[in-house]
Image: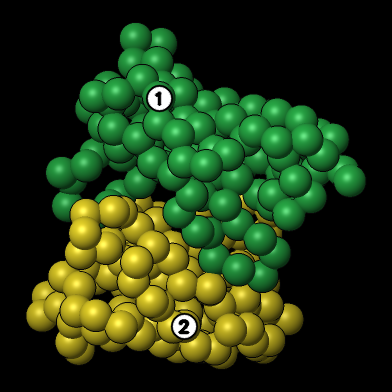
Chain colours: A yellow, B green
């Protein structure tokens, strides 16, 4: 399985500020995915990030709020912009395994917005 | 069409008992059904997955049963242990669909009492 490192692991932020979350994978992958898990809830896909192209956002998520970078095949960032308390969630980076097994997750970034 | 319904929301079993979690899906195009295990403060970890060409898959104490006609699948944990206490998510999606756009169930919080 892929090894996914995510930074920071947790952060407490002030309303109106922005936080950039980094995701590093130990092997080259075509697609990287960002999920959100609100407190006590399930996982919701935010966007899919392909190297060399614009990220594809799911319904309800927009680039201005969640800009994503994908500079190479092992790295991606997700920025949570102009944060409000409603953005308090766990943000998870995930990839598919090269062996065809789907969707491995990093440990996540636990974000609290005051 | 995209929903995955999971039950029960919470489950308490005694050590050595059988834990059973059920999921139902709507989209007949789905052909990949994984289960994830999540411990507090960690990202979800892929536990076991099944494709519709088989009705059952077993890995150690964990078994997936799949009923294509009923559009249902379930996770059975045999000889449940306190270390199995975690939140379990079922998911469904298209194996060939680019982006691993899995739809997740709401999660089941399992507690195994010693």
Res. B89 visible in picture: yes
Q: Is residue A30 left or right of residue B45?
A: left
Q: Which residue is mark 2?
A: A6
Identify the subunit bearing mark 1: B
Please give the name of the residue rendered at 52% of the width and 42% of the height, measured from the top-left corner.
Answer: B60
Residue B50 screen position, x and y as percent: 35, 35
Q: Quick one: SS at disc 2?
A: strand
- Is residue B89 depicted above or below A82 in this figure? above
Q: Which quadrant would residue B113 be assigned to in this image?
A: top right
- Whole-angstrom CA distance, mark 1 to mark 2, is 34 Å
Q: Which quadrant would residue A93 be assigned to in this image?
A: bottom left
Q: Quick one: SS at disc 1?
A: strand
Residue B48 screen position, x and y as percent: 44, 44
- Is residue A92 depicted above or below B59 in this figure? below
Identify the subunit bearing mark 2: A
- Is residue B17 depicted above or below A108 in this figure? above
Q: Which residue is mark 1?
A: B56
Residue B103 screen position, x and y as percent: 40, 42
Q: Is residue B28 left or right of residue B34?
A: left
Please give the name of the residue rendered at 21% of the width and 59% of the height, measured from the top-left corner.
Answer: A99
């Amino acid at each position: 399985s892929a090894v996914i490192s995510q930074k920071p692991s947790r952060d407490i932020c002030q309303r109106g500020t922005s936080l950039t979350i980094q995701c590093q994978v130990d092997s080259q992958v075509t697609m990287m995915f960002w999920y959100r898990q609100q407190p006590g809830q399930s996982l919701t896909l935010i966007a899919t990030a392909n190297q060399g192209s614009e990220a594809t956002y799911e319904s309800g998520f927009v680039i201005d709020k969640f800009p994503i970078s994908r500079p190479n095949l092992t790295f991606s960032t997700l920025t949570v912009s102009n944060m409000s308390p409603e953005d308090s969630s766990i943000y998870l980076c995930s990839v598919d395994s090269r062996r065809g097994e789907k969707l491995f997750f990093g440990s996540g970034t636990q974000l609290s917005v005051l | 069409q995209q929903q995955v319904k999971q039950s029960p929301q919470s489950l308490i079993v005694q050590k050595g008992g059988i834990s059973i979690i059920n999921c139902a899906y709507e989209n007949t195009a789905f052909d990949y059904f994984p289960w994830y295990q999540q411990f507090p403060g960690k990202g979800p970890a892929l536990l076991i997955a099944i494709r519709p060409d088989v009705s059952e898959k077993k890995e150690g104490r964990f078994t997936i049963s799949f009923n294509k006609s009923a559009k249902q699948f379930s996770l059975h944990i045999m000889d449940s242990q306190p270390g199995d206490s975690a939140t379990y998510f079922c998911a469904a999606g298209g194996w060939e669909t680019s982006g691993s756009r899995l739809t997740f169930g709401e999660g089941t919080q399992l507690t195994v009492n010693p």
